[in-house]
Image (cartoon, helix red, strand yellow):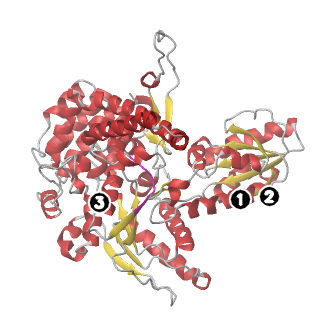
Amino acid sequence: MAAHLSYGRVNLNILREAARKELREFLDKCAGSKAIVWDEYLTGPFGLIAQYSLLKEHEVEKMFTLKSGRLPSADVKNIIFFVRPRLELMDIIAENVLSEDKVHPARDFHILFVPRRSMLCEQRLKEQGVLGSFINIDEYILDLIPYDGDLLSMEYDSAFRECYLENDQTSLYHTAKGLMTLQALYGTIPQIYGKGDSARHVANMMLRMKREFAGSQNQILPVFDTLLLLDRNVDLLTPLATQLTYEGLIDEIFGINNGYVKLPPEKFAQKKQGEASKDLPTEPKKLQLNSAEELYAEIRDKNFNAVGAALSKKAKIISAAFEERHNAKTVGEIKQFVSQLPHMQAARSSLANHTSIAELIKDITTSEAFFDNLTVEQEFMTGVDTDKVNTYIEDCIAQKDPLIKILRLVCMQSVCNNGLKQKVLDYYKREILQTYGYEHILTLNNLEKAGLLKLQTSSRNNYPTIRKTLKLWMEDANEQNPNDISYVYSGYAPLSIRLTQVLARPGWRSIEEVLKMLPGPHFEERQQLPSGLHKKRQQGENRTTLVFFLGGVTYAEIAALRFLSQMEDSGMEYIIATTKLINGTTWIKSLMDRPESQMP
C-alpha cells in the first residue's frame, strides 16, 4: 500500500510504521469489540497511516462521525473517541456518553487525543460529569504524516493563524516534538539553519528537548545532513501567486485534501457506444494523487503548458505497447504479453484520468479571466505600478468577483510594494466593505496583523532589491525544459526556494544584506553527534536536507525543490516537511473570520 514512501532517498515508511505500531498498541489496550467515533477532521490524515483493514484486525466493528445527540446503535463492548483537543468537541462527547449510559450502562468508554492530551479538555469533561466514565484517556502523537516519498505534513490547519494573529505557539511545540520523533528514527541532524522568529523558537525548543533527553540518544547514523527551518512570513508573496504546475493547478482549482481530489463526475462518465448518456453520475469522482501512480509522478511537477505534450507522448507509448499483441506469435511471447497486461491497463486508465483532468484545467487556464488575473500578478511581481490603485482589481470588485480572489491580489500588491499608501489602502478597504459587507472588517484587520496587508510606513521599498539580488524574476522562463526553478510560476522563482538554493551554494553569507531585509533572525546551530556516527561521504554522494516550512507550503514550491533535487550538479536532495499543504485560497481562508457565510 505505501511502497511509494520508501522509493526516495529517505525511507519515510519507517515513520508510518512507527505510527501504525502505536495505534495497534492503543487498540489492544481496549479488549473486546470496538466502535470508533471520529472527529471528522482526523479521518483524512488517519487514512494515510492506517486503512480500515488494520482497524478491523483489532476488533473495530463500527465507525461513526462525532456529532451531538445519541450515538448510532452498535453491539460493541468499547466505544473509543478519536478527537483533537478542542473544548467544543468535549461538549459533544459528554452528550454522547450521557445518552449512552442510560441505554447501555455496561459499556467501556475510551478517549484518544490527537496529537496531545489537554488538561483543559479533561477539566471540561469533569465539569460535564463524564470524566469518570472513561477507562483510558490517552494521547496519540501524530505530528508528521508521510504524504509521499519526499513529503511530510502535520496538516495543522490553523498554524499560521495561531502564530501570527493569536500569538499562540502551540503549533511550534508540536513541530519541535515532530522533529524530535524524526531524529529518534533517522538520527540526529548535525546542522540546523533557520530564518524567521518561529524558526528560532522551534530550534530553541529542539535544542532544549535534546538536552533534556541527553542520556537516551539513539545510536543511529544520521540520514539528514541539514535541517532548514523557514517561516512562512519570510516569503508572503509565493502562496498568493497562482501556481502553474500541474499539481499546483489541480489544488488551486479543485483542492487536494489528504492526497485526494474530488472532480466533476461528468468528465469521467464511461459512455458505451450507442447508449444515451442520460445516467450521468452525480457523485464527484475521487482520485488519489501520489507518486505511486507512475504517470502522475512524471507530470505532477511540470509547468501546465508542458503537460499536453507529455500526455500525448505517453499515449503513443501505451498504444504501441498494446499493438505488440499482434507480434506475439509463440506461446512464450503471448504469456509475456499477458503478464504485462494489468500494468498496461492501469497505465491506460491513468492516462484517461489525467487527460480528463488536463482538459478541465485547460478550460480554465485558456479563459480570458485567468489570463487577465495572471497578467496583473506578474505585473506586481515585476514591480509595475504597484503604488497606485489597480484598475483590474477595481473592475473585479465592481463585478463582485469572489472575495478571496480580490484579497489575494490586494495582498500581493501590498507585499510587492512594502505596503500601500494610506490613500490606496483606504480606497481598497472601503470598496471591499461596501461591496462584500462590513463584517469583513475583521478579516481585513487579520490580514493587516499578519503583515499581508499593510500601510507603507517608510518610503523605501526593499522588494526590488530582494528581487534583483535573488533573481526572483526570470524573463523567458523555459516551461518545456526548465533550467531554473522559476518555471513553476512561469517566470517568478519562489523566494523561499531561492533562499534554500543559495544556502546550499554558495551559502547565506553571500546574501547577508538581503537576509537582513527579510523579517526575523537568521541563524545556524550545530548538534553534536555521538562519536563514531559521523558520516563518511562517498565520492559523488548527495547531501540530504530537510526543509521545514512553518506556516504552510504550496505544491509549486514543492515542485521547485524536487527540481533542485534532480539537477545534475546540485549535489543536494531535499525532503519537504510543513505544518500544512496550502494554496492562496486556503491560506487566506484560514485568516478570515466567519469565512463560511460568504464563500462563493
Q: Earlier in the sequence, mark 1 or mark 3?
A: 1
Label 2–label 1 contact, CB within 8 A: yes
Q: Earlier in the sequence, mark 3 or mark 2?
A: 2
Question: What label does residue 496 carry, if any?
Answer: 3
Q: Quadrant of the C terminus?
A: top left
Q: Earlier in the sequence, mark 2 or mark 1?
A: 2
* SS of the residue under disc 1: strand
How busy is the neighbourhood of tag 3: few (under 14 within 10 Å), some, or many (20 plus)?
many
Q: Which residue is mark 2?
A: 29
Residue 45 part of the magenta-drawn span: no
Residue 211, x across and y down, in percent: 54, 82
Quarter where residue 113 is shown = bottom right
Image side of residue 303 versus residue 579, left or right: left
Image side of residue 79 versus residue 549, left or right: right
Amino acid type of the residue that numbered disc 1 sits on in the rendered structure: Asp
Q: Nearer the viewer, mark 1 or mark 3?
A: 3
Of residues 547 and 466, the one nearer the viewer is 547
- Name the residue at the bottom extreme: 531
Mark 3 vs mark 2, CA separation in Å:
45 Å
Label 1–label 3 contact, CB within 8 A: no
Please provide the residue range marked out in magenta. 575-582
The residue lying at 70 percent from left, 37 percent from top is 64
Residue 51, x across and y down, in percent: 64, 46
Question: What label does residue 388 carry, if any?
Answer: none
Question: What label does residue 138 carry, if any?
Answer: 1
Mark 2 vs mark 1, CA separation in Å:
11 Å
